[in-house]
Amino acid sequence: MTAVTAETAAPITVASEVLGPIPVAPDQIVAFADGLYGFPGATRFALLPTPRDGVFWLQSIEFSALVFLLVDPFMVFPKFHIELTESDKARLGTANAEDILVLSIVTMPPEPTQPCTANLHAPLMFNARAGQGYQSIRPDDAFGIREEFIL
Amino acid sequence: MQVMLGEVGAQTAQLEIADANLGALDTSLRAFKSNLQDADLEKAVTELVSRQTVYQAAMLSTSRIMGMSLADYLR
């Protein structure tokens, strides 16, 4: 991590339609240079923890209505695994597993009694140290776009 | 020809992922907006979690057991 000045280290306030105005620290900001699929113009997000282990918000800094719920796929899918590809390493700028975070976008069910699903086929991958992320598409079909789980 | 088919396949995959992203956004917003007007972070998640209280206890214990790091899975 490069040195930050006092000015850049101050939290900013981000508008969120779901969460309200939220304070975001500089180290919670992630750059998605290519956006997400379907949202190519959304290039800056706040990755925010929740009280639940392994559950996060991904709030767009540019678009207040753009917010996703993310889950740690390793926590809720015991069989989940991922093989780092050369493309991953290039996009993330690292091959160091300690710096890499993998999170899946959650889709809430239409009815509360139904399970949530997580996108394990196109997980978000983060270089936590550099504050960079991208949505990968896994080269195999080992895991699907809508894998059911109980949140 | 094979290259072209590969590109079409890649584009189809990208459309599917875009569709999934849109669906995730839509359902999340609806889930929260239906009964959370001025929720703070903690309240929002509490509400979210309480939607499936039947399974919550079981899941919590599972996720505590699954205290493995990414390095355990990356290979």
Image: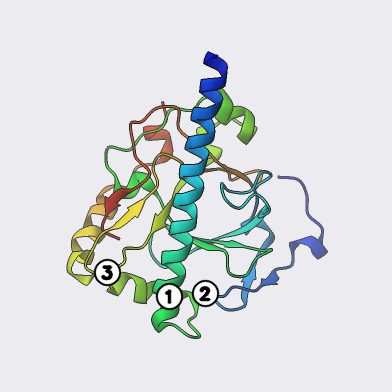
Say above or below: B69 vs A22. Answer: above
Identified at 59% across, 45% down, the residue is: A128
Give the image location of residue A115, x and y in percent. Answer: 25, 59
| Residues at circles 1 and 3 in contact by the CB criterion of under 8 Å | no
Q: Which residue is mark 1?
A: B32
Identify which residue, A6 or A15, lies in the foreground.
A15
Residue type at mark 3: give it.
Glu
Using the rendered view, name the quadrant where residue A64 is placed.
Answer: bottom right
Say above or below: A57 vs B74. Answer: below
Mark 1: few/some/many CA within 10 Å (<14, 14-19, 20+): some
Identified at 65% across, 32% down, the residue is: A93
Give the number of the mark in front: 1 or 3: 3
Q: What is the distance, in whole Å, between disc 3 and disc 2 at their CAs?
A: 19 Å
Mark 2: few/some/many CA within 10 Å (<14, 14-19, 20+): many
Q: Which residue is mark 2?
A: A18
Residue type at mark 1: give it.
Phe
Q: Which residue is mark 3?
A: A111
Secondary structure of the residue carrying numbered label 3: loop
Quadrant of image for the N terminus of chain B: top right
A103 horizontally vs A62: left or right: left
